[in-house]
């Protein structure tokens, strides 16, 4: 049974996918907007995504959903094969979350659903929104097929919100822009939990890790070795959600297991350069903060590889393969412009009208 935080307010279930931290963190501005518009958000997820949102919103009710248990192959070239192998497990998890959502709706007066890439979190009884920046699901020669499969799932929802702009000036490129789509689309603008603030630069490099194992750990181990003798000041965030925050100092590096939004916003603003994966949420965050960056896409993950390549070709952010990274690569930064925010304000009142229909 989900207990509402406030009485006499419509309750909206917000359910991000637990695949790294990106889906959860980009739901933070949506959850804040729901609260500001007198809705009661109920958090629904699992694993580190649920842990992060419970830390960000300790006073909100939450419910744990079945886990997709997504992991990556150790070798990037086997990424697609690993996904295919795990597909029966994924389908089972989607069925389990559909059952869980049915139970939640039957036992609690939920008035609407916002699902960030959780394919089974919808209901025909109440307005259901799907959030994705991947209208085209890149998978190499099977892109057409993976896109059609994804579209079949999204058709179960009332509307799809795309966290990007519709026009030529956009962040997602061909990922979020498609010629034909069979359900209503709303481009809601890039989502970020952060605000740009004037700050003195005190960190030379901020290393920001996230994403499923084992690739998160493989990159962490590589970067710890590479930066061992780096002369500048480094803040290293492992992207591991634990009960308590831990901080350790290794020479020039200050290592955190995780940071909450307020501290992370401050740290990014105070850092000259961010080194990270090229996940779409990270791209949106760094654009909002007008940051110089260097991207190392997760090996074999077509979406991240596409975003990194696109931003490099646009002379915005340099990037390289994981196995090719060395400290010398950072010398390329000056030849790139860095990411810039768009002048776009999300109209949440308009978006949330869907939940007012009887």
Image: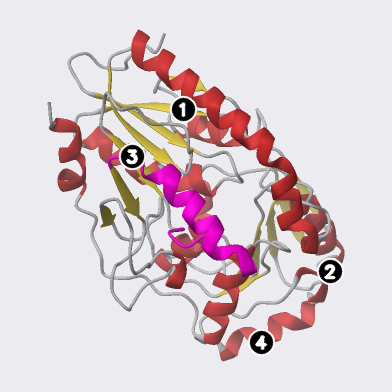
Q: Does dot 2 land on a helix, a strand or a loop?
A: helix
Left or right? Give the position of 320 relative to 56: right
Mark 1 or 3, closer to the camera: 3
Q: Magenta stretch containing residue 314, yes or no?
A: no
Mark 3 or 2, closer to the camera: 3
Placement of 232 over or under 299, stated as above or below: below
* Label located before the other in sequence (1 or 3): 1
The residue under label 3 is 157
Q: Residues within 10 Å of mark 1 (few under 14, many from 20)?
A: many
Question: Can residue 236 be seen by looking at this rendering?
Answer: yes
Q: Residues within 10 Å of mark 3 (few under 14, many from 20)?
A: many
Q: Does dot 1 land on a helix, a strand or a loop?
A: strand
The residue under label 4 is 332
Quarter-wise, where is residue 324 in the image? Answer: bottom right
Mark 2 or 1, closer to the camera: 1
Left or right? Give the position of 112 relative to 3: left
Question: Can residue 139 be seen by looking at this rendering?
Answer: no
The residue under label 1 is 44
Say which of 3 and 166 sits in front.
166
Q: CA distance from mark 4 to mark 2?
A: 16 Å
- The magenta span reads 134-158
Q: CA distance from mark 2 to mark 1?
A: 38 Å
Q: CA distance from mark 1 to mark 3?
A: 17 Å
Q: Are marks 2 and 1 in contact (CB under 8 Å)?
A: no
Q: Does dot 3 land on a helix, a strand or a loop?
A: loop
What is the number of callouts on the image?
4
Q: Position of residue 247 (x, y in %)?
A: 71, 43
* Label located before the other in sequence (4 or 2): 2
Placement of 356 over or under 240, stated as above or below: above
Q: Which mark is residue 170?
A: none
Mark 1 or 4, closer to the camera: 1
Task: Identify which residue is drawn at 49% across, 68% down.
Answer: 200
């Amino acid at each position: 049974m989900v207990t509402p935080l406030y009485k006499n307010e419509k309750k909206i279930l917000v359910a991000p996918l637990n695949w790294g931290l990106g889906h959860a963190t980009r739901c933070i501005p949506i959850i804040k907007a729901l609260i500001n518009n007198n809705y009661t958000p109920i958090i629904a997820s699992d694993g580190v995504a649920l842990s992060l949102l419970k830390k960000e919103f300790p006073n909100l009710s939450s419910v744990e959903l079945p886990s997709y248990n997504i992991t990556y192959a150790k070798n990037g070239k086997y990424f697609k094969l690993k996904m295919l192998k795990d597909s029966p497990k994924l389908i089972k998890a989607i069925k389990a979350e559909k059952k869980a959502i049915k139970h939640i709706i039957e036992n609690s007066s939920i008035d609407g659903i916002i699902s960030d890439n959780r394919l089974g979190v919808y209901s025909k009884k109440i307005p259901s929104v799907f959030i994705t920046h991947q209208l085209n699901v890149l998978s190499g020669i099977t892109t057409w097929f993976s896109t059609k499969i994804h579209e079949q799932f999204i058709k179960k929802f009332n509307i799809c919100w795309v966290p990007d702009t519709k026009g030529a000036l956009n962040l997602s490129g061909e990922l979020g822009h498609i010629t034909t789509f069979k359900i209503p689309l709303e481009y809601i603008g890039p989502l970020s939990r952060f605000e740009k603030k004037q700050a003195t630069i005190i960190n030379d490099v901020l290393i920001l890790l996230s994403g499923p194992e084992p690739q998160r750990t493989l990159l962490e181990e590589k970067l710890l070795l590479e930066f061992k003798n780096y002369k500048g000041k480094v803040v290293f965030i492992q992207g591991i959600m634990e009960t308590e925050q831990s901080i350790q100092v290794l020479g020039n590096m200050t290592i955190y297991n995780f940071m909450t939004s307020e501290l992370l916003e401050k740290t990014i603003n105070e850092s000259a350069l961010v080194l990270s994966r090229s996940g779409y949420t990270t791209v949106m965050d760094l654009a909002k903060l007008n940051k110089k960056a260097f991207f190392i896409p997760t090996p074999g993950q077509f979406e991240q590889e596409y975003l990194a390549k696109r931003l490099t070709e646009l002379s915005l952010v340099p990037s390289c393969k994981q196995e090719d990274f060395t400290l010398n690569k950072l010398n390329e930064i000056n030849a790139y412009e860095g990411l810039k925010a768009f002048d776009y304000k999300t109209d949440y009142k308009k978006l949330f009208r869907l939940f007012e229909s009887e």
